[in-house]
Amino acid sequence: MPSSPLRMGFLRGILLETEKKVTAEDVEDLAKVLGAFDENLNAIARELSVICRVDGPDIIIRGEEDSVRVARDVLENLLALSKNGERVDSGRVIYCIELAKEGRASDITKLSSGTVGVTFRGKPIKCKTVGQKAYADAIRKNPIVFGIGPAGTGKTYLAVCFAVQALKQKAVEKIILTRPAVEAGEKLGFLPGDLQTKVDPYLRPLYDALQEMLGVESYVKLMERGAIEIAPLAYMRGRTLSNAFIILDEAQNTTKEQMKMFLTRLGDNSRMVITGDVSQIDLPEGKQSGLIHASLLLKDVEGISVINLTDKDVVRNTLVMRIVRAYEKHGGGSDKGESKAQ
């Protein structure tokens, strides 16, 4: 017998009365998780459509059963993260909600162990997502790593951080940073200046990351000494790159031939990190991306790791995550060469 509208409304009312309590052991941890003016708690309430209120050391959550359970998992794991000395900001709150929806809220606490490096100003650099941690672990363990994912996931930044640490620890003698000089709407020949001046805009993200790690003065000295080399991918041809940490950025814009050329430059005591975003391919029509081809061809080769980051790993800004997700949902962005790689 079908339920009447009155009965269905009554059942929904019962669902809305589900209530759970999360108790904080430490007032300071509670304050960190709540955020300034309860902004983090309000974000949880808004994202999960629950009602949250603070009562002393307790957070009372009310709403539909599944949403309340997710909210409780988020709060319990954020409190554990704070207890481990980690900062709880809006980005981590949203990320923890995403994990909790998949039943993986506890994964957030894995991010409290260890730092990747330290900036010139002494700020520790840590992985902010589980995907970033997998990427960092892969770089530590493998001579060649592919980091593939959308903008804002920290692919280049973390790779540069590892390169700087390796140079400081004298594990390598130099850092080599390279990108294919593929134009996104502009022709290099029409830009003013010599070749270096023309390609500088394409390499700017690499300069910025290096200067943040080293400071401008140290960066300039290392460049003058030849310990840091930044050059277009074409300059790699015919070389053997030994005792170096090599990063190929924007690798989605390499052809298959260029990627093979680059990978076979690997010399003794060297490491390579290849980064790219397959949704932003600027190759001419009909050219297959060397990044897509190589990541599929080499994924099972010992010593090579392929890490695929997703919109959940976007740490640049939570709005960037939503932008990436919207484009993916509606099939936006370039996907040249992708179908041929499958």
Image (cartoon, helix red, strand yellow):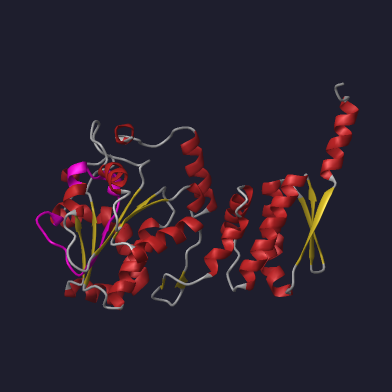
Would residue 238 be counted in the magenta stretch?
yes
- Does 194 appear in magenta? no
Residue 39 versus residue 57: which sits nearer the camera? 57
Q: Is residue 181 left or right of residue 309?
A: left
Location of residue 32 in the rendering, given as x and y in whole percent from the top left corner: 66, 68
Residue 142, quarter of picture:
bottom left
Q: Which residues are magenta?
A: 236-258
Q: Which of the image's four quarters has the C terminus?
A: top left
Looking at the picture, how far across and down is residue 106, in whole percent? 61, 59
Is residue 191 visible from the viewing direction of this image? no
Residue 247, visible in the rendered structure? yes
* Rendered location of residue 331, percent (x, y): 44, 33
The residue sitting at 31% across, 43% down in the picture is 296
The quadrant the N terminus occupies is: top right
Q: Nearer the viewer, residue 294 or 150?
A: 294
- The residue positioned 82% from the left and 68% from the top of the image is 56
Q: Is residue 34 above or below residue 251?
A: below
Q: Residue at x 53, y 65 (%)?
A: 111
Residue at the (69%, 62%) spot, across then down: 76
List x then y, in percent, for residue 156: 35, 58
In the rendered image, the vertical position of residue 285 relative to residue 105, given as above or below:
above
Closer to us: 263 or 195: 263
- Residue 239: image quadrant is bottom left
Question: In the image, is residue 247 above or below residue 13?
Answer: below
Q: Is residue 86 above or below residue 339?
A: below
Q: Is residue 295 left or right of residue 80?
A: left
